[in-house]
Amino acid sequence: MAIQGPGDQNCAACHVAQEASFGAWIDAATLALTSQSHGGQQSEQCLACHFRSQVQQATALTVHNRDLTALAAITGAVPVPASGGGLTATSVNLARMIHGSSDYNSALIPCAACHDEHRGQDHEMTVMSDAECQVCHQKPFESFNVGHPEFGSITPTGIGISFNHQKHAARFTDETLTCSSCHMPDEQGKTMAVASFETACQGCHAQGSRDHHGDGIKRNSLLFLQLPELEFDEPVYWPTDGAWGEQFSPMMLLLLAGDEDAVPILYDISEDAYGDLFEWGFILEDNDELYRKVELAAVIKRLVAELTDYTDVGVDARNERLARALGVPATSPVVKNLAAELTSASFVMQMFTQRYLPQLKADLAGETPSPPDNVAAANDWMTSRNMGGWHVDSAAGTISYRPIAHADPLLKHWIEAVFAMPSAAATATPVAEQRQYLRDKVVDEIAANFKACTRCHSVGDEGISWQAGGRHDAASGFVKFNHAPHIAMLDEGDTCKTCHVQTVEGADNNSSMVRGFAPHDKTVCASCHNSTGVDNSCTSCHQYHEVRP
């Protein structure tokens, strides 16, 4: 929609001084770029219409719409002397006289500093000259071909899948593995997409040996729940003949940590007995605290009852338990996703309870049923077509889970939940401190036992990386690049290697790009982007406003 139609006078839509006198207009024009107050008012008029989601309102008028503290950390120091023709140091200084020089530590840059209006219908307000770009830069240079710094190395950030191209290439002596084996342009051709695991990786990274379930499920299973071997001096409803657990699995430990009564017991087992239930039993005997075994049995039975309950009450109980254990809100997606996986296994939990604790409901209601007998005298396997990878082994007295091929949903949500837990120790109460200790133990267990996942899916401050990272986050804020026209010019051989050069085996990793590549060579770009060839201006490769991919 046009701001002003034929014959209309709607200057106030953009100009804050529209109703002022002629003299005030002259003053406003003089102060437009030097007065922070006037420039700010005028910019508010611009942002009212031109605000976009990727340009945050809070930083829209800062240099490159970046946080000022972050900008201060990346500023240069000594200007690079210019030589020859083109953009010279004199022209840069002249540009500073015309456009002004912004002190990014204290001032905001009005929109009109770069976007000049009233220059005719064909004037493009978004176009900036090299001189305008270098008004504020502390390291001015003549052009991309003369004075522009070499492309530097990038420090890995842990974003995206961990993949080293050099190590993979070394395993192939022929041309069977090329860049196009894993990478292909997206629909626009601008960005190179990464092929799926099934297409690019599964041929070598097979799931391993399988059993009678076929190719869908791995043979190796993950222990989820096992009742610990406990002996009591008093009658306790407990399957003594069918409970053989010697320590808690990470999954069981975390779920139990969602019970306030369980946390001090689990902390003592982990801290004093190094997680060994037999050693803990000896400690209790020495301290005359055998009653704590009864307390442990009680919190485990509560957990089993919650896992068995498929009603809405059970769902809510599992959500609250997971939220307390993870230290995140019950509404968090990691809680809801993991709780949904546990709900889908309620049939398995019911089978387990029927075999080992058939009168659990009566026991929790305060009755005193007799301990179950002959709990292991059942079929070795109890399965259901709808159980996915869950199974109950009545011979071992366990509930285990077999991951279902790559990207198994339970493992994915389990790992996401564990690494979403807060890392800073809580100090509000002793129970909170103990729970944090248990969380750290679980994280250590996951890091050690799930290397099949975390070897490729790196863990960083932003969580676990399930997808390829695309353009590297550290370099993508202001750099723009379109693969399509470049690939069209390089139509012979494996053209990606023209720009993406792998490091030599044994080279210093500190000087290399992430994922096994050397820094890009500026001369490759400069062979086309120069004063007589393709556009070599600043805005050809850089955008002013920071936009993350």
Image (cartoon, rainbow, N blue to C red):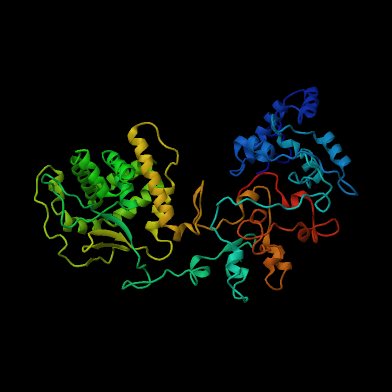
In-image side of 86 versus 435 (left or right)? right
Q: Is 456 on the left-hand or right-hand side of 49?
A: left
Extreme residue toward the right, this view: 84
- Point 13% across, 43% down: residue: 365
- Residue 289 occupies which quadrant of the picture? top left
What residue is at 86 percent from the left and 58 percent from the top?
532
Numbered circles on residues, count: 0
Outermost front residue: 286
Q: Position of residue 143 (x, y in %)?
A: 82, 50
Q: Residue at x 16, y 65 (%)?
A: 378
Q: Pick the residue in front: 192 or 377.
A: 377
Between 25 and 287, the one lying in front of the other is: 287
Q: Between residues 44 and 371, which one lies in front from this camera angle?
A: 371
Residue 402's quadrant in the figure?
Answer: bottom left
* Place of residue 115 in the rendered image (x, y in percent of width and height, measured from the top left): 74, 40
Q: Nearer the viewer, residue 281 or 357?
A: 281
Provide residue 227's location: percent of width, then percent of height. 23, 53
User: Horizontal and vertical percent for residue 495?
Assistant: 69, 68
In the depicted structure, whether residue 468 falls above or below residue 208: above
Is residue 381 shown left or right of residue 258?
left
> In the rendered view, would you say 538 is above or below 327?
below
Whether residue 112 appears in this view of the structure is: yes
Horizontal side of 436 relative to 541 (left or right) equals: left
Task: Determine the image quadrant of residue 500.
Answer: bottom right
Q: Is residue 311 visible in the rendered structure shown here?
A: no
Q: Which quadrant is home to the N terminus?
A: top right
Q: Residue at x 10, y 46 (%)?
A: 235
